[in-house]
């Protein structure tokens, strides 16, 4: 998967996780992308992220795009200014 994403060279990748059972694998994927493609901006969304323990919330809070259009606009606007 990383080879395909690297070939396309996107600026953003959004991941949504609905089921808590998939949360650990989603987080592992995020960490793998961060190590392999440091320029890729990852956005996270989905109900499963609401059950993250506090230490994980702090680690991934900048990746959380929010639930509303306004929150998404603010998140992406902040990154586009960088």
Image: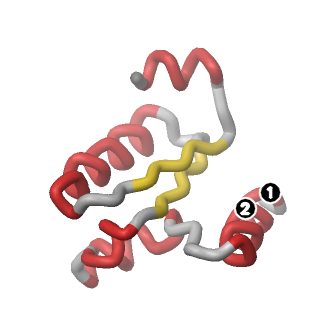
Image marks 1 and 2: residues in contact by CB distance under 8 Å: yes
Left/right placement of residue 53 relative to residue 73 reads left
Q: Residue at x 59, y 49 (%)?
A: 41
Residue 56, quarter of the rendered image: bottom left
Q: Which mark is residue 80?
A: 1
Q: Farthest residue toward the right? A: 81
Q: Farthest residue toward the left? A: 21
Q: Position of residue 57 (x, y in %)?
A: 35, 77
Q: Check disc 2 and report the residue beneath it.
A: 76
Question: SS for tag 2?
Answer: helix
Q: Position of residue 76 (x, y in %)?
A: 72, 61
The foreground one among 18 and 82 is: 18
Question: SS for tag 1?
Answer: helix
User: How many residues crowd mark 2 within 10 Å: few (<14), some (14–19), many (20+)?
Assistant: some
Q: Residue at x 27, y 84 (%)?
A: 54
Residue 39, quarter of the rendered image: top right
Which quarter shows the N terminus?
top left
User: How many residues crowd mark 1 within 10 Å: few (<14), some (14–19), many (20+)?
Assistant: few
Q: Which mark is residue 59?
A: none
Total labels: the figure holds: 2
Q: Residue at x 38, y 78 (%)?
A: 58
Q: Residue at x 26, y 75 (%)?
A: 52
Of circles 1 and 2, the one toward us is: 2
Which quarter shows the C terminus?
bottom right
Left/right placement of residue 19 relative to residue 57 reads left
Q: CA distance from mark 1 to mark 2?
A: 6 Å
In this view, 1 is above or below 48: above
In this view, 19 is above or below 69: above
Q: Position of residue 80 (x, y in %)?
A: 80, 57
In this view, 61 is above or below 19: below
């Amino acid at each position: 998967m990383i080879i395909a994403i690297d070939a396309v060279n996107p600026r953003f990748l959004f991941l949504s996780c609905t089921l808590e059972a998939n949360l650990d694998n989603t987080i592992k994927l995020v960490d793998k992308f961060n190590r392999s493609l440091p320029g890729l901006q990852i956005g996270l969304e989905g109900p499963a992220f609401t059950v993250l323990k506090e230490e994980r919330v702090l680690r991934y809070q900048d990746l959380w795009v929010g639930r509303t259009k306004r929150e998404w606009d603010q998140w992406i606007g902040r990154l586009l200014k960088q």
